Amino acid sequence: MVRKIVRYPEPVLRAKCRPVAAVTPEIRTLAADMLETMRAANGVGLAAPQVAVDVQLAVIDVSHNPDCISFMKINGEKVDMPQHMPIVFTNPQLELGSDKAIAEEGCLSFPRLLRDVRRSKQIKVTYTNLEGQTVTVETDGLLARAFQHEIDHLNGILFIDRLNAVAKVSLKRKLERLMQEWEEDDEDSLSAGEK
């Protein structure tokens, strides 16, 4: 089932999410719904707070672009990335590499907004999957960036928080305009639904 993606400035996007205590049927359904919602919106990642659920659960799928990383290791073993997509993860612990890179990012909770964000080039993340197994992934490129972006969501941090001071100032007016457009989009959707 495709769920509604909440948009900035919904308070749930600032929530520090609760750990997933157990993988229940509800968590499995939520994960499946999130994958369907992410794909319907042409996204590469989606975190639970983006569908108004404040738990530490997120999904990622970058298999459409197999050249977006230079390596991926799972539990220390080199793997072929497309075979391990999508990734559904809970309760992540993130270790950031020291080298940084700037790249353009967007967010499904900020339609039509793209900005350059500085993040670690490589990461190591340990999480629990839906089978209850502890998994450690080491990677770089778009997959590393997606992990950082989604884990930020689980901590109530948005990609606009990662912008430099100058970019934040220039964003203010653009964000006000976009929020007005999003409101109009919602009104148009409601009107179309009533017909």
Image (cartoon, rainbow, N blue to C red):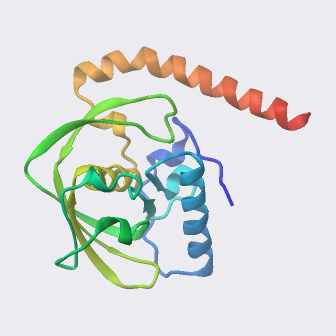
- Image position of 79 with respect to 142: above or below: below
The picture quadrant where one finds residue 129 is bottom left
Percent of width and height locating residue 8: 51, 36
User: Residue at the spot x=60%, y=20% of the render?
Assistant: 180
Residue located at (31% from left, 23% from top):
168
> How far from the left and from the top, in percent, is residue 14?
45, 46
The C terminus lies in quadrant = top right
**Quarter location, residue 191:** top right
In this rendering, the answer to whether 133 lies above or below 190 is below
- Quick one: 66 or 135, which is closer to the camera? 66
Q: Which quarter of the rendered picture does the N terminus lie within?
A: bottom right
- In the current view of this chain or complex, which residue is farthest to the right? 195
Give the x, y percent position of residue 184: 68, 23
Q: Position of residue 22 (x, y in %)?
A: 49, 82
Residue farthest along the left direction in this orientation: 98
Q: Looking at the image, which is closer to me, 97 or 86?
A: 86
Q: Quadrant of residue 134?
A: bottom left
Q: Please tell me how many numbered marks the rendered image carries.
A: 0
Residue beneath the point at 76% across and 27% down: 188
Instruction: Say whether residue 147 is left or right of residue 43.
Output: left
**At 25% from the left edge and 36% from the top edge, which residue is drawn?**
103
